[in-house]
Amino acid sequence: MRSLRLVFAGLVVAVLGLSGAAYAQKASKVTVVNKSDWTLVEFYMAPSDSDDWGPDQLKDNIIEPGENFTLTGIPCNTWDLKLVDEEEDECIVEAVDLCKDNATWTITNKMLAACVEG
């Protein structure tokens, strides 16, 4: 009987742990901080194992230099990110691990310059 209780207790902990993980994924948010000199007008995400870009995460918003934008409900994954600035230059940053309840992703001039050089 004791071993049955231990198994049951283990199952309860496992289920609660999964529920908590699912909730954390639903509640996760990523703050995009623009520390570059360019205004970002579009921001797309795709799982790194996919070629399909999702919708523009900014919609009608922009991220001016020095500003930030918060995305919510981002599932834990490794993402490819596509940024478009006010001059319509595109920058793709691959394999960004966004797997935290509250993550911050900072965009810098160096990061964007690597796209132009690459």
Image (cartoon, rainbow, N blue to C red):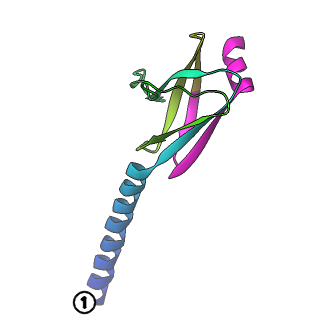
Q: As rendered, which of 20 and 30 lies closer to the eye?
A: 30
On-image quarter of the N terminus:
bottom left
10 versus 35 height, above or below: below
Position of residue 105 in the picture relative to residue 51 (left or right): right
Q: Residue at x 35, y 74 (%)?
A: 10
The residue that label 1 is drawn on is 1
On-image quarter of the C terminus:
top right
Amino acid type assigned to the residue bearing label 1 in the image? Met
Give the quadrant of residue 64: top right
Rendered location of residue 39, percent (x, y): 61, 21
Q: Residue at x 34, y 61 (%)?
A: 19
Magenta region: which residues?
94-118
Give the quadrant of residue 72: top left
Position of residue 56 in the picture relative to residue 90 (left or right): left
**Camera sees residue 79:** yes
Rendered location of residue 94, percent (x, y): 57, 27
For the image, the number of numbered tags is 1
Q: As rendered, which of 47 and 81 lies closer to the eye?
A: 81
Q: Residue furthest bottom?
A: 1
Q: Secondary structure at mark 1?
A: loop
